[in-house]
Amino acid sequence: MPNALAQESSPYLRQHQHNPVDWLPWGQGALAKAREQDRPLLVSIGYSACHWCHVMEHESFEDPDIAALMNESFVCVKVDREERPDVDAIYMEAVQAMTGHGGWPLHVFATPDGTPFYGGTYFPPEPRYGSPSWPQVLNAIAEAWDERADEIRGSSAAIAEQLGGGARLAPSQQPITVDTLDAAASALESYFDPEHGGFGAAPKFPQTPVLEFLLARAHTHTADSPEGAMALDTLHAIAGGGIHDQLAGGFHRYSVDATWTVPHFEKMLYDNALLARAYVHAFELSREPTLEQTCRHTLDWALREMRGDEGGFYSATDADSDGVEGAYYVWTIAELRTALGDDADAAIAWFGATEEGNFSDPHHPRAGQNVLTAAGLAPPDKQRERIRTRLLEVRAARSRPALDDKRLASWNALMISALADAGTVLGESRYLAAAQACADFILTEMRDSDGRLKRSFAAGQARLDAYLEDHAFLLEALIALFEATCEQRWLAEAVTFADTLIARFGDPEHGGFYATAADSEILIARRKDLEDSPIPAGPSSAALGLLRLAELTGNDAYRSQAQGVLALLAEIAPRHPAAFGHALQAMHWSLAPMRPIACPLPAPLAAGAGSAYSTDR
């Protein structure tokens, strides 16, 4: 018999509806049950495309004996981190403080009021990898609660005070200058990988907010500036590596190695929206055709495979097929020869495929197009397209990765921005049309009867109150649409969302913005999430959007609100630029001049301004 998750709309939660665990969704019902029974909460957090989440489910949550241990001593709660980033952020910070690391699946044991006292990530069903088994953890925590519940409650109370993210950060009196941004760029250069692109060692993430900061700087200098070189080299390397689906387009989440070769195979909408936008901005800077092609390849994949009939975009595709990570994407030499015939040798050279392979499965192409193209081994365009077409035909017969079809307001807003920018720069009307259709979907189907934005749309309904990032990303997206189309309705909606996020998320005492609204569900902490990794933080996005809106409307109140965010980050962001790429972009645009565009504004919006303005891209 299905558990309570069968009634949920989240694909991730529904994946667990047939577990013998008595899962409950996060909410007052679960907390009330824990209080009534005086049992700890066991909060398990993940997302639908998470490989190790699937592994732990199959190993432990589907095991009747392990499930019985969980049900006997705990109130078990499942959380989709993509629907509830507020819950995830609190418990992720707690586990990182307790253990020094974090990740998903995330498992937290909490008092009945939700205060965490122990946690970790993946636990195996028996001791291995230097980790205790999941049953050992369950038994130890149950025993500790039975014997020392009052002590645990007392010691965990101090933890809650530390879980506000940047909520206790005070604004800096230090002004933001060009030297501030120079220092941030120099810090990035110090750990840039000149051989393979990107920053640091494996595993490597695209770090798109950082690349956009470097591109923004390069736009005010030259493409061959250090900032431009770092961004362009990285984007070329990513486009040529295995992290990029060379056949269908789109990018996987990250590379497990330093060369962008072997990816972790899930595809997330946010990565692809952010990277598509970065590629079109890089093309604006360098006019290199490969960058334009990569942008188009990515957006065409999203329009083809990730778009719902109503115009919204799905969240992700899984890393696994039939329980095997990467099975849908990887190839053996024999498979290439069977599929391609006379084109096989060219494809093998292009992909750098070898008999021994390089993936644990063991047949993912070893080298990326970037290395082989430089060596002159890439086939001609017509042959390359013939290879792609044939391999896609063969791949289509394989078992496809699962699709998470929920639409998230914030991630869809990122895709709107990418489509709007690409449609303008590339002169592609269908991208602009798709951006407008997606915006119309959010503004009509993802609002409640009072006009308030919702976070998630799945199974035909919008649900959950939207967060700061939803409002801020949509603010940026609506401005991008206005700049692309000069249609006043987009600017009017941008003003509405700006006023809403200031009223409901702003911190009038210390400046900046909270992740949750003042009237949202009360958790053990109200956070300010500040780091732009892997996606822009809500406050950074709000700052950038409000700066643009101030230029477009002449309303300096928006600029003042943006400066409140930047004052909180003025010292920390330049010292840790890899974690604050979007904030650094906002700092850059707070100093950089804007150029006018010919979009006259109506008097109520203009507030004395004579014209709208565009960034100098």
Image (cartoon, helix red, strand yellow):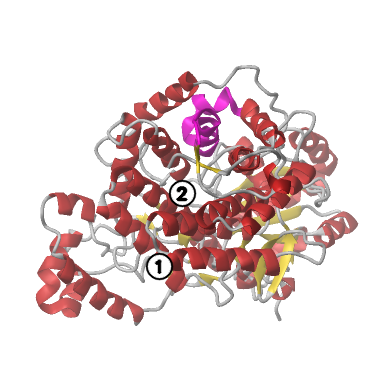
Within 10 Å of disc 1 (Cα), the crowding (few <14, some 14-19, many 20+) is some
Q: What residue type is labelled 2?
A: Tyr
Residue 406 coordinates in the image, percent (x, y): 60, 68
Specify the quadrant of the image occupied by residue 612.
top right
Q: How many angstroms separate mark 2 from mark 1 (CA)?
A: 38 Å
Total marks in image: 2
* Quarter occupied by the C terminus: top left
Towards the viewer: 170 or 200: 170
Which tag, 2 or 1, sits closer to the chain's start?
2
Q: Which residue is painted at 59% across and 75% down in the image?
A: 310
User: Residue 70 at what x, y percent from top left?
Assistant: 70, 61
> What residue is disc 2 on?
129
Residue 548 circle label: none
Q: Main secondary structure of the magenta part?
A: helix
Q: Residue 301 carries which label?
A: 1
* Residue at left offset 37%, top offset 34%: 218
Q: Give the range drawn in magenta.
A: 569-594
Q: Which amino acid does label 1 sit on?
A: Trp
> As drawn, is 12 to the left or to the right of 113?
left
